[in-house]
Amino acid sequence: MKLGRRKFLGLGGAALVGLSLKSEKKIEGSFVNDSFQLGHLLRDRAGFPAVKHVEKVPVVIVGGGIAGLSAAWRLRKRGFTDFVLLEMNQQPGGNARWGENEITAYPWAAHYVPVPGPKALYVRELFEDLGVLKNGQWEERYLVFSPQERLFLYGRWQEGIEPAVGLKQKDRDQFQRLENLFAEFRKSGSFTVPLELGALSQSLSNSAFLQNFRISIALHFPIGSASRVSTRDCFTGT
């Protein structure tokens, strides 16, 4: 049986269509705790209803993220309770918020922190209050492996989140300068928190530190073991 040129091309085109790449299945989902619209009301100077009640307090903590909650925790630990914490979302916690289903609680975002060293006095004190650290020993049910991170770049996956492919030499030199700077600070103790215990307050001025730190690339801090802490266990409300 002979095929004409036109019929042959038609069959070949159909075959190529069948072999063409199909579009990936769309991932269903949406953002949660998405409340930037409320924040934009202040930014855009939107009109608000007239004030009907005025309440004065000595201290106002704006924001119920981990920084605001930590401030409230520290004030209460010091015996000061005449403060108010303001949070625009229905749930406090910021990037450390959590959710729950019929099986377990789960984190929405940043629930993982490096296991604090002996000089991280405030963090260790917080973990002691939460029952994560008991008599100098870490509760194993709160310990997890270090997060594994990968970067998809130029059509391929690579380990870590610092790009290893497609970099120019000046970019590689910049990464190397950053690593050298980290190594110097770690050796001197400049990364110790609280700062009053670190070498930063003794040997480096803030302006010099910030000038050295002005590097226009994404930063990645490798960590060892990690501890999972939920604000649900820290605070019961605002």
Image (cartoon, grey):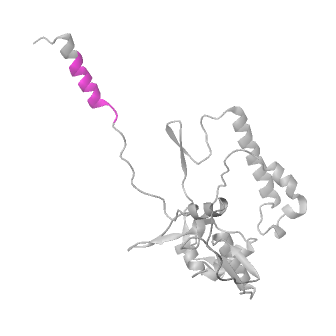
What secondary structure is the magenta-colored segment mainly?
helix
Horizontally, residue 78 falls left or right of residue 53, namely right
Q: Could you say where residue 112 lies in the image, as x and y percent from the top left? A: 58, 65
Determine the residue positioned at 41% across, 72% down. Answer: 101
Q: Quadrant of the C terminus?
A: bottom right
Determine the residue positioned at 70% across, 75% down. Answer: 61
Q: Does 14 appear in magenta?
A: yes
User: Which one is in front, 155 or 54?
Assistant: 54
User: Which one is in front, 155 or 86?
Assistant: 86
Q: Quadrant of residue 8?
A: top left
| Total number of numbered discs in the rendering | 0
Q: Quadrant of the N terminus?
A: top left
Q: Quadrant of residue 23?
A: top left
Residue 52 in the image: above or below residue 172: below
Residue 156 in the image: above or below residue 113: above
Q: Does 40 appear in magenta?
A: no
Horizontally, residue 12 falls left or right of residue 150, namely left
Residue sitting at the far front: 50
Q: Could you say where residue 74 lies in the image, as x and y percent from the top left? A: 72, 80
Residue 100 visible, this orientation: yes
Residue 68 in the image: above or below residue 148: below
Extent of the magenta region: 9-21
User: Which one is in front, 152 or 57?
Assistant: 57
Q: Quadrant of residue 76?
A: bottom right
Q: Could you say where residue 121 lies in the image, as x and y percent from the top left? A: 74, 75
Residue 226 visible, this orientation: no
Horizontally, residue 110 falls left or right of residue 208, namely left
Q: Could you say where residue 224 lies in the image, as x and y percent from the top left? A: 63, 60
Residue 102 in the image: above or below residue 149: below
